[in-house]
Image (spheres, coloured by chain):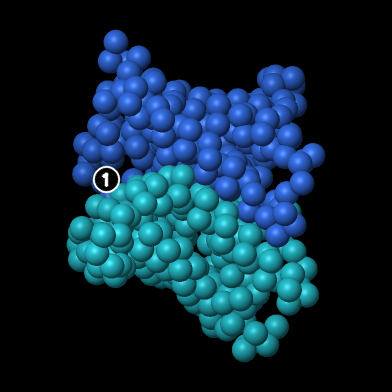
Chain colours: A blue, B cyan
Amino acid sequence: MDLVYLAIAAIFVNNILLAQYLGNCPFCGVSKKLNTAVGMGAAVIFVVTLASIFTWMASRYILVPYNMEFIQTLVFILIIAALVQFVEIFLKKQSKSLYNALGIYLPLITTNCAVMGIALLNIKHEFGFIDMVVFSVASASGFALAIVLFAGIRERMLISPVPRAMRGTAIALVTAGIMSLAFLGFVGMVD
Amino acid sequence: MSFKKILFHGLWKDLPPFRLVLGLCPALAVTSSVENGLGMGLAVIFVLVFSNMFIAMLRKFIPDKVRIASFIVVIATLVVIVEMTMKAFFFPLSQQLGIYIPLIVVNCIILGRAEAFASRNPVLLSMVDGLSVGVGFTISLIVISSVREVLGAGTWFGLRVVWDGFEPFQFMVRAPGAFICLGVFLGLMNAYSRKRGELFIQT
């Protein structure tokens, strides 16, 4: 039951995008069409899960036993960058269809702060392995949910008369603020 | 570009995050109080100046194919230095900024300047460029956080600045306020740029 609470809290209450402000660049960049948003969401779930497992293991089995927590940032970013590169090469060779679906989003993910942020949060909360996996998948799903919902709104926004100065990123951020207000309503769900 | 142009381009022409829409995450996350905004800004200035310096020094030795990875290693090393310095001398601030300090590594402004400027310019000019963009970013953070702190908590830099009986809007210091505040700022910036006859740079 605790795991369910953990997942719900990560998806809705502490939504990685709308409550913790992580991953805004792809949020504004690739949310113009619904299908690219779905692709980005899927790629993020995939990479975040892998990256969290690897960074968590590196932290638990290498950095902590040898008292090297101070280079955590450096190690994590290298693991994430290497992993993204590796996943890209692997998908290209092994699964053409998955590569076609996710391929173009992968390079963008290295600089997506949601991936690094979730890896750091796992360590900060001192999760065990199962908790860590549930939290990572749920947080990444929260990101996917937010970006897909947002893309839906943005497609409609194209046909609505937005004031000229507010077009583009400006109105996107205001919309995100209103969505974030809606997500704030979930705070009562888990205490 | 002349020296003077490089010194000032970060303050208006390429002002992040308003005109160069990069680095939105810290601009939203740490601007709930002026103190946090300033702390973040100074950390970014340090990382930006020195990453530009080292990358400009190494630009002839870094092979083109692995340049992004090399830049990230340089930036991450500097971020580790900032993290340790903050923990040692500014502990309360480092607790408040939390995971956003290590996240400077993935701040697109720093990688952006490394790629666009430091990898093809001499050392001193690159440092000036880093300083200029960093100071511009810090000023922007201070502006956003001033609005949010005054409206959301009724204080500025921890000092009470509003009249008695003012009811602070809790909303402004929380997540929705951050998004809406930055969105409105971008809108104002666009309107002002249009009035001056400049082109839109956001899409």
At 44% from the left and 26% from the top, the residue drawn is A11
Instruction: Work out which residue is located at the far front of the displayed protein and give it.
Output: B165
Query: In this rendering, is residue B99 above or below B109?
Result: above
At 71% from the left and 29% from the top, the residue drawn is A34
Tell me if B146 is positioned left or right of B199 in this view: left
Q: Quadrant of the N terminus of chain B?
A: bottom right
The answer to whether one can see residue B21 in this image is yes
Front-lying residue, A73 or B25: B25
Q: Position of residue A175 (x, y in %)?
A: 59, 42
Mark 1 packing: few (<14 Cα in 10 Å), some, or many (20+)? Answer: some
Q: Quadrant of the C terminus of chain B?
A: bottom right
Name the image quarter holding residue B195.
bottom right
| Location of mark 1 (residue) | A69
Tell me if A125 is positioned left or right of A180 in this view: left
Q: Position of residue A54 (x, y in %)?
A: 41, 30
Front-lying residue, A45 or B111: A45
Q: Position of residue A154 (x, y in %)?
A: 69, 37
Q: How many marks?
A: 1
Mark 1 element type = helix
Query: In this rendering, is residue B160 above or below B27?
Result: below
Tell me if B196 is positioned left or right of B96 in this view: right
Residue type at tag 1: Glu
Query: In this rendering, is residue A92 above or below A3?
Result: below
Q: Position of residue A8 (x, y in %)?
A: 39, 21
At 72% from the left and 39% from the top, the residue drawn is A157
Name the image quarter holding residue B93.
bottom left
Q: Chain of mark 1?
A: A
Tell me if A184 is positioned left or right of A89 in this view: left
At 28% from the left and 38% from the top, the residue drawn is A124
